[in-house]
Amino acid sequence: MTDSSGQEPAGGRAGGAAKQVPRAVAALPRHVRDDLVRRLRRKGRPFDKGDVQVVEEPMLKRAVTASALGNCMEWFDFGVYSYLAATLGKVFYPGASDAAQLLASFATFVAAFVVRPLGGLFFGPLGDKLGRQKVLATTMIMMACGTFAIGFIPSYASIGVAAPVLLLIARMVQGFSTGGEYGGATTFIAEYSPDRRRGFLGSWLDFGTFVGYALGSALVTVLNFLLTDSEMLSWGWRLPFLVAGPLGLIGLYMRLKLEESPAFQKQLDEHDQAVAQRETSRHEFRTILGTHWRALLLCVGLVLLYNVTNYMVTGYLPSYQTEVLHRNGTTADVTVLVGMVWVVLLITFLGRLSDRVGRRPVYRWAAIAQIVLAVPAFLLLRSDGWLLPGLGVLILATVLAGFAAPSAATLPALFPTSVRYAAMGIGFNFSVAAFGGTTPLFAEGLVDLTGTGLMPGYYLMASGLIGLVAVRFMPESAGVALRGSQPLVGSEEEAEELISTSRQLRTLGATRRQ
């Protein structure tokens, strides 16, 4: 007697039963096998072709590109604003001291994050009802308009207090649109990605994030090198914001060419149809807070872990080096820019790694590294020269890549299809507003209050500890179909393989019950 793999079972009855497990089933990670078993129990039969969705490769590539481009544009603006924080403080708050100018500039920066949860509350339910693609096209338009408008705001010297007020309004438009952007983009790309490759494909979303930041910061670095201080204060600072207009048109064109995500088109599997019907008759937010509060807390904790590090490196380090360490502006800009390029090189590799070893190990080791290395990294940053400070930035950038790579695949998997966009809008934007976007302001305030230049390192240690708790309780989602959605594969061959595996699992389960 041979098993389905063609191997002769050996040993007694128990040993023979153990060796009769088909090779395809034995090769499945435990959490993937358990998820398949649960789905098969609900169906009461193996999968057939109608139970497995196949995503077309050309549409998948287009979806990944369009989603990444939106993030690229958002973070192009972010990189520009971060690198121009000191300059914008002089343009819009000229009567204040240097420290007060920087704090005021960061406070305006934080204002965009205050309205992000409102954007998430507004766009999230629309994305669950009208579709992901339509909402993402709208957020792209708003983001481009808000960024483009900053380039035309007159200075304080021209119109007085109206200048910082207009800057604040433009930033709030950006924040409101961004409230629907990242949660929608992660949802969209996760629902397009085959289950086995979701980590790798999702990492391209944050690849766009850091490419956008690198492009924005590189443009400001070049302008600072080519223009005098007076030219930058007079008109040079406007140029990077004006670039957002053409970028926005390109991004809008690409998003309008997209089809809706497969998961949203199919909407829900049979098990969740009744749940969806009940939920449409109730208030969606009440459902999210009442039914999915555990997933919401995990989302907040994971986003905190990622974004405190993210905004510390991208939002605060340029100003920290120039205003606290009194380092040459070009040197400070280049060290952080090199760190962003390093993240870009690492991120898709770590995304692919998360598909193989799981999301939790990647998060866990990055969090431990942050706890252990944050303060040493800031000690290196305070060193003379450029080699040791550059090494400090690279350490923080490597940790950041460890958080960024699995995030776009992990966060949407916490919620079912019917409420995914809205739940992401609430959890992600609340956490970013409360803990992420405030990081530059809090870090600068702590340094000013204590006079200790290592306070940002201690701040990162605290966020690492909180995030490690969230990682401890998060479910492993690598290789598993999204909640409330059918399994998604990249080819007909993968579909046949999954159907065959489901039959083997079903047969194995029946044999064991006998």
Image (tube, helix red, strand yellow):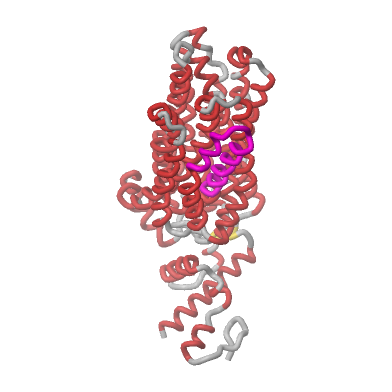
The answer to whether residue 511 is visible is yes
* 273 left or right, relative to 480: left
Q: Quadrant of residue 211?
A: top right
Image quadrant containing the N terminus:
bottom right
Residue 37 place in picture, x, y as percent? 45, 70
The answer to whether residue 265 is visible is no
User: Residue at position x 56%, y 51% from top?
Assistant: 192
Asked if residue 397 is among those painted magenta in the image, a careful observer would answer yes
* 436 left or right, relative to 384: left
* Residue 126, placed above or below residue 142: below
Residue 507 place in picture, x, y as percent? 49, 79
Q: What span is colored magenta in the figure?
A: 375-404
Please tell me which residue lies in front, 179 or 188: 179
* 274 left or right, relative to 209: left
Most prominent secondary structure in the magenta stretch?
helix
Please tell me which residue lies in front, 171 or 361: 361
Judged from this view, the residue extending furthest toward the right is 226
* Residue 185, placed above or below residue 225: below
Asked if residue 297 is among those painted magenta in the image, a careful observer would answer no
